[in-house]
Structures are given as structure tokens and as C-alpha cells.
Amino acid sequence: MTYDVFISFKNSGKDGLATPDAIAARKVYEALKSQKIKTFFSEESLAEEGRGHFSKAIEQALEAAHVLVLVASCREHIESQWVEAEWDSFSQDIRSGNKKGELFIYNCGDLRPNNLPLFLRRQQLFPEVGLEKLIKFVSSAIPSGPTLNSCVQLALHCFHPEKNEDKVYLVTVQQGTSAGSYNVTAHWGARSAKRLSSQIKAVNVTDEKAKVEIEKAKQEKVRGGYSPAAHANLLTDEARSFLSASLGLTESDNTPTVTVKAVKPIDKKKAVVPAKEKSSAPVSPAKKPVKARSAATAANLTTPAVPPKVIAKPGTADPRKVVSKSKALVPVKVETKLKVAVPLKIATKSKVVAPGKVAVKRKIVEPIKVLPKTKAAASVKGGAKTVKTVCISGKLPSGKKKADYEGPLRAAGYELVDDVVKGLHYLVLADPSLPSGKSEKARKMGVEVISEERLAQIVR
């Protein structure tokens, strides 16, 4: 059973009799119960739980509660072993970001703020005559309607980078269609997933049966390599929103958004060939189609009357003039690493002499196409050149970023792209066996889905 409020107090004194704290705590419990607020009060709730392991029941109640009411008459009772363990663990969860919650102090003695332990001096202190006001504050601190935090009863994490495993497994329990009945559902998927797969384990079962289902799932998964973890640190923002919506929960959950956020990928295509970059290098045919040249233009390009000047130093401008319909004189920059793009034919050996340069003999027997600089190698299919591409999606188990693979992929003859597109060779996922939107799209297009381990073999 889940609780919204946990009442912490010292039950008996050194003489074995009930303390003033215990009497005041029962008043608080009865007031909260009258407001139909689920409250953990040890004298009543432990009997309802029917468990021999009281510490485990207290731990689960503390984890689920949104509010802790500390009832005390003196500092000595506040710092008693069990009471201090309860309010301190609740406060630690809030400070560490594992949950959101409120802690209120109900003063049934002569407590003063400066007499409280250091970590409690900032908390709201209510006098014994202010019980009604305390109940209002508690009611306001409880989220309206069920939340994901109250429904998740089991959260497990499986992380084995050597096996390319980074997975989550959750079990949620919700109210069934009849009073006192519950529905148990399992959810699983990759830690970086935007939505989890789910399966209903039990419908309209008793509280005890629901607990059996949870324990059964836990034992099975622990044997498979899973370990307990806070679900707030396992789910992405998208997965949390989708899970809340699918379960019909409110968005005002008490779970912090501290999960891994996908970093906005760099547009590799724009990085290689900027759209507005001005360059003297020949424009790739894929970016700017070349219009058919007229006979006059061809004559100007092939006539030996104006021999081209070749500069030996790379990166310097070539004064060769290309005539087009729009612009008459367009200087073309030729780099020594690129082949000449202009279909220039010279039938005889000629000496091309530039002022101050050594004469160079050149013989060009056929037009040569310029191969633009690219980060990926090209393969030939049916006379057309296609680029080998790889898409890396999601967080990799090794912790490496996509940029870490950019250089090795380029060296191996591949180009890194950002999405599953036509002609893609490989899609890299943290767990190729798990279903996702990209993996389904890739398989429909005939793209091979591989793991990071396979990727490492490709670039090795």
C-alpha cells in the first residue's frame, strides 16, 4: 500500500509508557484520516501491513510519502535513534533530488526553532493548538490525483557495457475497477528510450497478490543481472511523459527531471558544405547543376590560343577564364590535390609557362571530373557513385559521443549522418534487439541495425 503522509514520533519513553508525542501523533493521524489522506501511522499501519519486517515496511512508506509530519515535544525525542533515521532519510531524498516533498514539525511541547537540530530549523513549526492549520498545509503539499512516483513500485537497472546492455525495468500498481483491487503492469526498454514497452501482469487482484507479482518480477530480473535504482534517474523526460499519459496520471509528478537529455546533433552535411560559404573551388554537381555549354563556350575552353597557366603552389588562384551566359570571367581555383574539372583537351604537347615559374609539360587526353572533398568514400553501383553512410542514435553504452566516431568512420570510408534516410548502410543503437521508431523504419528500408560493438569492428 502507498501512503501520502508519514508520521514520525517517539512512541514510548524510558519508563515504557507512551510519550506525549505518541498521544499528539494519534490526534494528527485521526485528523488526516478524516480528510481521507493516506497516512502511515506505525501503531495502525504496521498491523494493516501484517508484516514481520517492520523496518522494510517503514522504508517503503517513507519512500512513497510526499509529506513527513514530525511530532515531538523535546529535542531528545527528535534525536532518538528511529525518529532521527526517519526524518533524516526523508530529508536526504529531497536534498539529493530523488523526490520532492515537505517536512512539517508539530510541536506538542516547548520546542523553539533555535533548539532544533540544524537541518530542521528551516522547517515550518506548528504549535499544538495549530492542528487545523497543519492539516491544511499537509493537504496542499499532496499532489492532486495519482502520480508516477506513487504508482512505480519497482525500478530496476541493467548496465553491462561489455554486453552492450543499458536497460530499465519498472512495475507499476494502480487502483483496479473495484474497491480494494489493483492492476499490476511491467514496463521495460533501453534507458535512452523515449517510450517503454509494457505488459499487464495482473488485473483486479488483491493487495497481497499485487505484492507477490512485484516480488516475483524482482527476483526474476535480479537473477538476470538487474539491480534496484531510483526510477527518477533512469527515465528520459519523453519516456516519463509517455508513461504518465499511458497510465492516465497527472503531469505534476514528484519526480525530478534529471535524466539524460539527448544532445542536439550537429548537421554533418552543413558542416561539410556550408550553404552560404563562398569558395573559389569548383561547385559539386550535387549542389549546383552545370548548364549545357554552347558551341562558342566550348570553343573558348578548347582553343590553344589562350593556354592555361598552372601554378605549382597549392591553394593559389588559376587565372584560367571560364565563359558562361551569366558571367564572362569567373576565376577558378585549382588545388593540386584535385583533378581539373574543365573538359580541356590538348592534342599536342605544349609548354605552359607562367612568369617566374619553371616550364611544365602537360598532356591532357580526356576530360577529368572533379571529385569534391568529402569525409566519406564512394562506391560505384551501375555507373553511379553512392556514399556509404552510418547513423548513430541514442546514448552509446561505452559513453562515447557520436563525434568520437566521426574520424574513425571517415578513415574507414563512411560518412556519419543524423537520421535514417534512403541509402543508409548501418543504424547503430545501444540495443538493436529493442523496438524503437528508428529501428522499425530502418528495417523496413532494408538497413542493417548494429550495436556499438559491431561499429567498433567496422572502424578498427
Image (spheres, grey):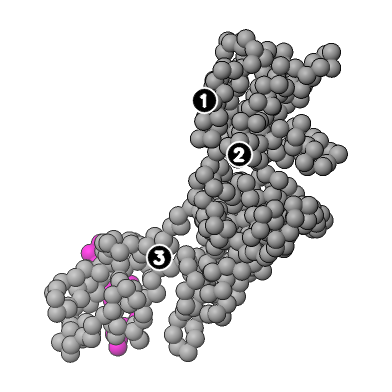
Q: Quadrant of residue 358?
A: bottom left
> Percent position (x, y) of residue 192?
58, 56
Q: Which residue is mark 2?
A: 37
Magenta span contains residue 360: yes
Query: Quick check: 279 above or below 443?
Result: above
**How much space separates mark 2 and mark 3, taking CA atoms?**
57 Å
Left or right of residue 54, residue 314 in this image: left
Q: Residue at x 70, y 53 (%)?
A: 180
The segment highlighted magenta reads 346-363
Query: In the rendering, which numbered label is found on residue 101?
Result: none
The secondary structure type at the circle numbered 1 is helix
Q: Residue at x 46, y 57 (%)?
A: 265
Bin the neighbour count of mark 3 within 10 Å (Cα to Cα): few under 14, some 14-19, many 20 and up: few
Q: Residue at x 14, y 76 (%)?
A: 326
Between disc 3 and disc 1, the foreground one is 1
**How much space separates mark 1 and mark 2, taking CA atoms?**
15 Å
The secondary structure type at the circle numbered 3 is helix
Give the residue type that dot 1 points to. Lys
**How much space separates mark 3 and mark 1, taking CA atoms?**
62 Å
